[in-house]
Amino acid sequence: MAVDGTTPLRATAIAALEGLDDWTYVLESLQAGFAVADFGSAAALAGTIVDAADAADHHPDIDLRYPGVLRISLKTHAVGMVTMRDVELARTISALAAEAEATLVERPVQQLEIAIDTVDMDRIRPFWQAVLDYDYIERAEALVDPRRQGPLIWFQTLDPPRTDRNRIHFDITVPPAEAEGRVAAAVAAGGTLVSDARAKAFWVLADAEGNEVCVCTWQDRD
């Protein structure tokens, strides 16, 4: 099947594409971080990216931070995933960043999610949706911040419920090259590796009191 500009791309297909060395696939988006000499230069680079996005009629999320860092996230909002339109714009942004003599930031991307265990998602979801003022995305069975500021909330159905663990845990998604180092650092800091049965999709860790977090990547999911 031919891939057009609006066909969602799977992570393995994105990983095989050329011209994306600056970019990391994280939770159905392409993300990159660029650093320049100062805040004004970062704002100027953001302006050139905006012009390119307007010309392409395809727009990224841009986060400008002091002293001169741009973090950029790309996905096709109509489908909620990465398409060739994102890939093409990512390549354009990389070229603009190179012209501006920008460098990749040392810690470019990661994304936090919160998972809530439940035996009845429909019973508890309205509470979390209301208290956080989030939107419900039925396709993903998840709550998302319409401001694109807070972490995604997803629900893990357990029947029967588990009584030997906390009901809420964190998922931190990182670039694949960073995952094992992050796991090792957490264990060295007093944590426990609960399970690596699903690595490299995710590793389950716990702190000294049993509170859990999963270190996740896009790999081994397709």
Image (spheres, helix red, strand yellow):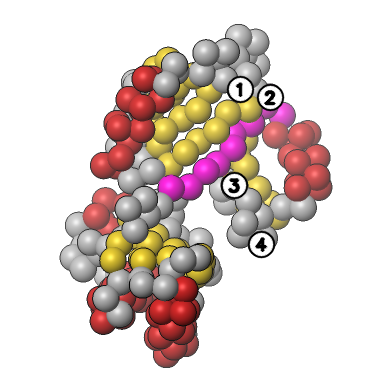
> Is the residue marked by circle 3 packed among few (<14), some (14-19), or many (20+) residues within 10 Å?
some
Disc 2 marks a residue whose amino acid type is Val
Residue ID at (67%, 26%): 118
Label 3 vs 4, first from the N-terminus: 4
Camera-side mark, 1 or 4? 4
Disc 1 marks a residue whose amino acid type is Leu
Residue that label 3 marks? 152
* Quadrant of the frame with the C terminus: top left
The magenta span reads 110-120
The answer to the question of whether label 2 and label 1 lie on touching residues, with beta carbons closer than 8 A, is yes
The answer to the question of whether label 3 and label 1 lie on touching residues, with beta carbons closer than 8 A, is no
Give the CA distance from mark 2 to mark 1.
Answer: 5 Å
Residue 105: quadrant of the picture: bottom left
Disc 4 marks a residue whose amino acid type is Arg
Q: Which mark is residue 147?
A: 4
Residue that label 2 marks? 119
